[in-house]
Image: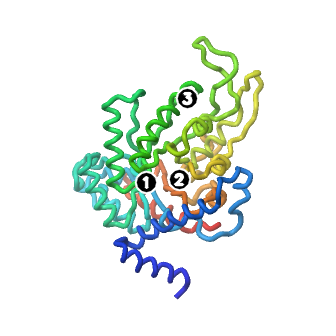
Amino acid sequence: MSAYEEEMDTAGHLGHRLGLNRRRFLAATTGMAAVAAVAAAGPLKSAAQAATAGKGPNGILVPPPRRGIILYTVRDAISRDPLSSNLPSGFRAVFEELGRIGYAQVEFAGYSQHGNAEGGANLESVEGARLLRRWLDDNGLVAQGNHGFIPGSWPLSQADLDRFKLHLEIADILGMSHVGTGSDPTGSAYKADWDVAADKWNALGEIATAAGLKLYTHNHDVAYSFLLDSGPLDAQGRPTRSSGIRRLEYFLQKTDPKHVWLEMDIFWAHVAQYKYKTFTASDGSTQTQVFNPLGVVQAQTMRFPLFHAKDGKINTGTSNGYDMVPFGTGDIDYAAFFRGTGAKGYHNPMYEQDNAPGDASHPGQSLQYADLSYRNMSALRG
């Protein structure tokens, strides 16, 4: 028996004694090992130190317990009518297929499915969460996060606060460690609006922390564009130029690292690298500053517990510079990225592909891509 096989065998025996299946046992022990490693390492390293750490071959880059998928990728299967298709349809059948493929984690993108699927159309409730949790457990899956409800009001209305707390309760039932959203804290380019958003998220983060959850925001390319925070004011008294700081970098500075976390969509961060290279400085000059997605993570690696592992094929004929493709078939160097993040075993990459659902001629495409992407994620070595 090899050392790896002995480790798996030991995990199976210990997991059985603790009432855990092998996958959930490994997820738990990997997390504890990561925490212990970080604690032993002392204070976080600088970006320069982090850039030199973890270089060179170091085995599997995404351990089996950390391989995940956001369910938005297979939304067509979840919303498919089980009475009109023999393909996996609804949450339960999709969980069965994802577990068969090998995924260990899922990230939710809402709790709705086709009305004819078991449990009905809307599972955004305590009862619905209990049903989902049973199906997750049955298939060896761990719910790691969600793109759910974030209150629109500020100061918080009672109705928004009550609904936010319901989502925290649902997340707890599902066994999540994180709770989040798929939207930016604000769509504004102005510093004053990001100040307000930071105050709001600090408050929401404290509520989530008290519930035992990490609150995170997920962002696309525009969040990495330049903040308008300097220069002459416009007719409304708003700044028209930038000091060179990007919106989300400013948000990181203004929010409490004990209560607010981020999920980087690595594809959209590379789109930002392609799109947002220059800014107008306060003196009116044009300055060039190329965005470094990995550098942002390296500077505060523990604030990025989740990633969207979305791959892209370079296509400079489009405004984004990339086309979305299955994981491992594009041009984004994921081996270098995961090798360079530091805190190995801490991060949770969730495969995502917005355009995975197929048409009438390819109704099973999203799950086929999920299978291919899992195999490619599993094969990553550093």
User: Which of the numbered marks, if any, corresponds to residue 305?
Assistant: 2
x and y, in percent, of residue 130 in the image: 27, 55
Q: Is residue 380 visible?
A: yes
Q: Is residue 360 rendered to the left or right of residue 271?
A: left
In the rendered image, which quarter contains the C terminus?
A: bottom right
User: Which residue is label 1 attached to?
Assistant: 177
Q: Are marks 1 and 2 in contact (CB under 8 Å)?
A: yes
Tag 1: Cα neighbours inside 10 Å, few (<14), some, or many (≥20)? some
x and y, in percent, of residue 288 in the image: 75, 35
The three-letter code of the residue at mark 1 reads: Ser
Helix, strand or loop for disc 3: helix
Q: Is residue 106 rendered to the left or right of residue 258?
A: left
- Residue 38's place in the image compared with 200, above or below, is below
Cα separation, mark 3 vs mark 1, equals 27 Å
User: Which residue is label 3 attached to?
Assistant: 195
Q: Earlier in the sequence, mark 1 or mark 2?
A: 1
Task: Identify the residue at horizontal 63%, vertical 43% (top origin).
Answer: 321
Task: Identify the residue at horizontal 62%, vertical 46% (top origin).
Answer: 270
- Residue 57's place in the image compared with 287, above or below, is below
The three-letter code of the residue at mark 2 reads: Pro
Cα separation, mark 2 vs mark 3, equals 23 Å
Q: Earlier in the sequence, mark 3 or mark 1?
A: 1
Helix, strand or loop for disc 2: loop
Q: Is residue 359 visible?
A: no
Colouring mode (rainbow / by chain / secondary structure / one colour): rainbow
Q: Is residue 293 rendered to the left or right of residue 175?
A: right
The three-letter code of the residue at mark 3 reads: Asp
